[in-house]
Image (tube, coloured by chain):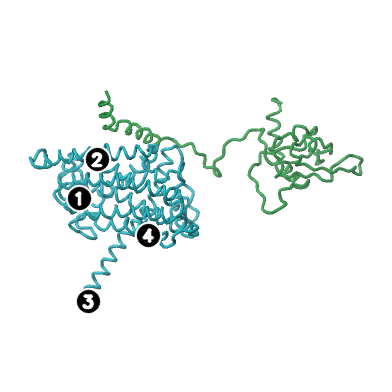
Amino acid sequence: MIMEQIELIVWTLVKIVAIVLPLIIVVAYFTYAERRVIGFMQGRMGPNRVGLFGFKLWGLAQPFADTVKLLLKEIIFPANANKFLFLMAPVITLATAFAAWAVVPFSDGLVLADINAGLVYILAMTSLGVYGVIIAGWASNSKYAILGALRSAAQIVSYEIAMGFALVGVLIASGSLNLTEIVHSQAGGIGQWFFIPLLPLFVIYFISGVAETNRAPFDVAEGESEIVAGFHVEYSGAAFALFFLGEYANMIMISALTAIMFLGGWYSPFTGDSWIAQPSILWFFLKTGFFMLLYLWFRATFPRFRYDQIMRLGWKIFIPITIAWIMVVAVLKVYHIGPWFS
Amino acid sequence: MKIFNYLKSLTLKELFKGMTVTGKYFFKRKFTIRYPEEKTPKSDRFRGLHALRRYENGEERCIACKLCEAVCPALAITIDSEQREDGSRRTTKYEIDLFKCIYCGFCEESCPVDSIVLTDIHEFHFESEGKNVLDKTQLLEIGDMREKEIAECRNNDAEYR
């Protein structure tokens, strides 16, 4: 009995490591890809120097150099900062960012926790991340940090609603809260994927995701020109690295979720019996990678929104459209209109 | 018409346009010069590190007229002179403080015998205090080392002077 329990715990821990370790490496290379891709789009080279053993390797060792640098640096505590909360904030951000990965199905059955309310769990975890931001801003005892945290929190909370509504559409279409079930209901080629009947929700979900992760063009929370770096202005060294890790893990998370909810997760866009039509984890990675690239592409293209424009977009445009489209989806579903709901 | 603008913005047309532009630039040729391996061409008139030249018979050109010392706007040059045994006037001390020097090239222009010149060396550094002051032997050494390049640059530029 006890042995079984121990075995279960050890086995779960192994699975967690198997998810988190590759995730951290992907985050590291995502930062590298970001600098490279944005550089290329701006007619520059990006980092191409740091290599291993005298080989340059297009700068592929850059993320490791950055990591070592950040970990070796001192964590500076601002005067009169609340030390406990100051250190807790990055941990909360990172923990929630990683915890959400527990229910992400990478392939059929390849999921750490196949819980029935996976969608709700994800919404809960991504929303909890905002506590890290608020606490970081408050504990820093800095006016820039508190302003950044307030902006960030207001923005995340606003877009959470549009995001939630967009997911309600997916929920209606698939009839399940379980992420594996959601992917299963999109089986059968590109025509069955939810992004066709739910096109406005698909677009709004991803844009809200960009806003939720405080990325360009919605990165007023760290607007360098006004409030230096926002809520993490006082952080340095390893604590800053945790924020960084959390932010990028969240970005990959949103990319993966968009792929699962709207682009059929691990299913191939082709139909038939050939090898290319087989469902595979590679399809999932490909789709996730596409959205990760979109994040970088957005950042290279769009100028930062003004704060009131962000609020207007979230409340006056996204929420009405999502509500309207939920009605449309409901009608389609009830009367079995179209190939998706027959 | 406002409603049309609203509907038009819903198609995200302008956003896609912007992304097309950045997307195109992604594949365009990059103009970055990978510096230590690749270098941009330098002008014959490039004003870099200083050097003192010699005549072909090995005699140093400088006659200690001190025109360069006088013209130097940053007072970077210090010269002491003495009569040599053969009766000619020569410098006993010729120092340039590279921290003071502004690399204006006036010393080179004022020199009646083309002795002090600015070479095209721009990659140099000092590793300890006081190394910023170049003395006469160092300057002559640089001149001996780069004489060929220095003469070539002066020759190329001569017809425009």
Of the residues shown, which amino acid type is indicated by label 2? Ile
- Amino acid on which disc 1 is placed: Pro
User: What type is the residue that disc 4 sits on?
Assistant: Val
Dot 4 crowding, Cα within 10 Å, few <14, some 14–19, many 20+: some
Q: Residue at x 27, y 23 (%)?
A: B1
Both marks 1 and 2 on one chain: yes
User: In the drawing, what numbered circle is on residue A2?
Assistant: 3
Q: Considering depth in this image, is A112 or B118 the residue closer to the camera?
A: A112
Q: CA distance from mark 1 to mark 2?
A: 34 Å
The disc numbered 4 marks a residue on which chain?
Answer: A
Which of the two marks, 4 or 3, is nearer to us in this view?
A: 4
Q: Say whether disc 1 or disc 2 marks the residue closer to the N-terminus.
A: 1
Residue at x-position 36% and y-position 46%: A214
Dot 4 and dot 3 within a common chain? yes
> Mark 1 or mark 4, which is nearer the start of the sequence?
4
Q: Earlier in the sequence, mark 3 or mark 1?
A: 3
Chain for numbered disc 1? A
Quadrant for the C terminus of chain A in the image? top left
Disc nearest the viewer among 1 and 2:
2
- The x, y position of residue A56, in whole percent, is 47, 50
Mark 3 Cα within 10 Å, few/some/many (few <14, many 20+)? Answer: few
Q: Secondary structure at mark 3?
A: helix
A129 relative position to A268: left or right:
right
